[in-house]
Image (cartoon, rainbow, N blue to C red):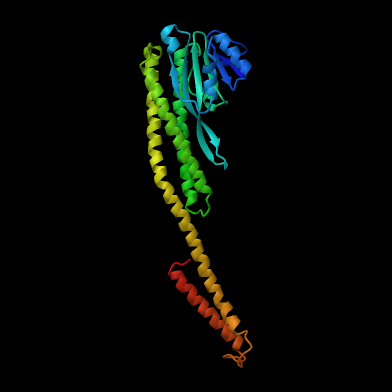
């Protein structure tokens, strides 16, 4: 699917019906015909359009055509998305986004619609000028770094919720959810390090730093990315240490329940033992006493109460 957007005079990004000079071309999971159309219209190699559609594509920047005779530049960077794992637990993954800059337009290529670009379309983060290509590309990169931090905060909140639930849990669901958090942090760490290398390469490229304002914006992107890396490293270490602790907590909760059930079973077995003994067809104490039933019941209750008090003081339940 190909859609066109352009910043209007009132600084609002609006969808337009067809290509215009200075517009933003947003491409989501294009068909082969759409790939051919884009390649011919903007003189972009098909590989530059197809590469971001591979989930395993590495981050990179292509400046060959900039250095020779400017036709286009390509930046592929990993961006975070919210997902569910195979068991339905919250997880964050990353997918590549391709940003192609030509003299006429900026083209973004993604495999699926992502909220980052949706926020840009709705202008929720800041003002964007699609005609100022370099600044617009850097603003997209800044939005990607911002979303890493946003999703990291979401992971932290989710982790705190799981921590509260695990204190009383005896099931494995919370551990599976915790494993999803660990996987998310691994995805983030890998993607952020890859993005860091791309940003460092862009710093030394005059194409992205000719203007002072563009250079400052790129530095802001690098700072946000470094902050996300630091947060990811910190919480990866915290989560790594908490994983074994949570397993021990769940095992301990189960032991407490088993201890309670065992103690309760012992207490309930006392009246059963007495009833079984006095149910035998043999000569037994008090068998001829008219108050035998009451005496036996009273003795049974006293023994049961004493046993319960002993177990309670020893904290068996």
Q: Determine whether, in the image, residue 137 is placed left or right of residue 84.
A: left
Can residue 157 be seen in this snapshot?
Answer: no
Of residue 183 and residue 24, the one placed in the foreground of this image is 183
| Quadrant of the snapshot with the N terminus | top right
Residue 119 rendering spot, x and y as whole percentages: 53, 24
Q: Residue furthest bottom?
A: 288
Q: Is residue 315 above or below residue 134?
A: below
- In the rendered image, which quarter is residue 53 located in? top right
Task: Judge whether 191 appears above or below 311 on screen.
Answer: above
Residue 91 point in image, percent of width and height: 52, 38
Residue under the point 38% across and 30% down: 227
- Picture quadrant of residue 226: top left
x 57%, y 78%: residue: 271
Question: Where is residue 21, by image quadrant?
Answer: top right
* Residue 317 location (% of width, % of height): 48, 66
Above or below — where is 67 with respect to 223? Answer: above
Q: Is residue 93 visible?
A: yes
The x, y position of residue 60, in whole percent, is 44, 21
């Amino acid at each position: 699917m190909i859609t066109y957007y352009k910043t209007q005079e009132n600084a609002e990004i609006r969808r337009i019906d067809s290509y215009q000079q200075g517009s933003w071309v947003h491409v989501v999971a294009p068909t082969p015909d759409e790939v051919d159309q884009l390649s011919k219209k903007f003189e972009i190699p098909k590989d530059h359009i197809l590469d971001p559609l591979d989930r395993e594509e590495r981050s990179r920047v292509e400046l060959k055509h900039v250095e020779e005779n400017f036709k286009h530049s390509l930046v592929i960077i990993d961006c975070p998305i919210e997902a569910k794992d195979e068991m339905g637990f919250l997880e964050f993954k990353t997918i590549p986004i391709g940003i192609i800059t030509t003299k006429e337009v900026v083209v973004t290529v993604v495999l699926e619609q992502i909220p980052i670009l949706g926020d840009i379309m709705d202008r929720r983060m800041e003002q964007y000028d699609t005609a100022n290509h370099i600044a617009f590309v850097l603003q997209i990169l800044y939005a990607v770094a911002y979303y890493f931090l946003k999703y990291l905060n979401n992971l932290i909140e989710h982790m705190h919720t799981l921590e509260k639930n695990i204190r009383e849990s005896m099931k494995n669901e919370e551990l599976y959810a915790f494993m999803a958090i660990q996987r998310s942090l691994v995805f983030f760490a890998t993607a952020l390090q890859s993005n860091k290398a791309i940003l460092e390469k862009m710093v030394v490229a005059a194409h992205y730093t000719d203007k002072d304002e563009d250079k400052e914006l790129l530095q802001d992107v690098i700072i946000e990315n470094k902050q996300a890396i630091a947060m990811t490293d910190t919480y990866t270490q915290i989560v790594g240490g908490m994983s074994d602790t949570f397993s021990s907590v769940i095992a301990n909760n189960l032991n407490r329940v088993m201890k309670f059930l065992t103690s309760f079973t012992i207490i309930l077995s006392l009246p059963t033992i007495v009833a079984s003994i006095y149910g035998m067809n043999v000569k037994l104490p008090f068998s001829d006493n008219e108050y035998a039933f009451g005496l036996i019941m009273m003795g049974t209750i006293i023994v049961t109460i004493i046993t319960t008090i002993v177990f309670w003081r020893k904290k068996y339940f």
